[in-house]
Amino acid sequence: MFDAPLRRALERPLERAATALDIGWITPDRLTAAGLVLGLGSAAAAATGWWTASIVLWLASRLADGLDGPLARRRRARDVGDAGAGGFFDITADFTVYGATVVGVGIGSDGPLWPFLLVLLAYYVNGTAFLAFSSIAERAGRTRDDGRSLSFLGGIAEGAETIAVHTLWLVAPFWAPQIAVVWAAVVGLGAAQRIVAGHRALR
């Protein structure tokens, strides 16, 4: 829901940071890998109750994830790119980090696990909806190009909201199960929204 305005607001700062990072040994894939490793470290820290470390690793992970795209676009502008491998790695890493964080917080919060299982189910349905749309839209010639590797359907639960909620339950792990219940409902509604919108767009 807030992704588009947030991406516009952060576009110039991220471009400046990508310019500073545009040196030979730093590649978009290495930034993606760094985000993946940091995100998994955050999940492990959450599972063991090291909440401060988990927050720091989580935010560092999302910063790396925010920089790999602008750097990739700079490299493509100089005809130093790929056929989509970077975008594939990026979305796979994101899904891995999000899922691992849910598991880590579920274990570390010492509360019931069923709210986090609901979040994982909602993520599964939501991810299926937008990845299926992206694939079929590509074949049907109905892609939505906003500069990212995939055709995204907007919704009430997007990347910005996900980062905010994951940060919130790392800051307040004692409320994590309650946050998870609400978040599962929001993601579930977003998934339903994407299913309807995707079906209409492809008819």
Image: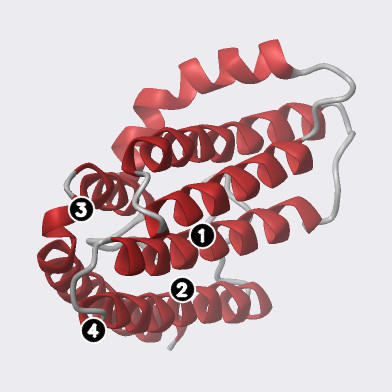
- Closer to the chain start, of discs 1 and 4, is 4
Mark 4, residues whose alpha carbon is within 10 Å: few (<14), some, or many (≥20)? few
Numbered circle sitting on residue 54: none
**Comes first in the chain, label 1 or label 3:** 1
* Residue at image point 56% right, 64% down: 96
Q: Which residue is mark 2?
A: 130
- Give the CA separation, mark 2 to mark 1: 12 Å
| Mark 1 element type | loop
Q: In the rendered image, which residue does mark 4 sit on?
A: 114
Q: Earlier in the sequence, mark 2 or mark 4?
A: 4
Residue 59 is situated, as x and y percent measured from the top left of the image, at 42, 35
Q: Amino acid at mark 4?
A: Trp
Query: Which amino acid does the dot numbered 3 rest on?
Result: Pro
- N-term mark: 3 or 4: 4
The Cα atoms of the two marked residues, 2 and 4, are separated by 25 Å
**In-image side of 28 versus 113 (left or right):** right
- What is the secondary structure assignment of the residue under circle 3? helix
Label 1: few (<14), some (14–19) or many (≥20) C-alpha neighbours in 10 Å: some
Q: Nearer the viewer, mark 3 or mark 2?
A: 3
Please report contact status of discs 2 and 4: CB closer than 8 Å, yes or no. Answer: no
Colour approach in the figure: secondary structure
Q: Amino acid at mark 1?
A: Arg
Under circle 4, the secondary element is helix
Q: In the image, is 181 to the left or to the right of 163? A: left
Reading the chain from its start, which is encountered first: label 2 or label 1? 2
Tag 3–tag 2 contact (CB < 8 Å): no
Which residue matches tag 3? 173
Eyeballing the image, is 163 above or below 131? above
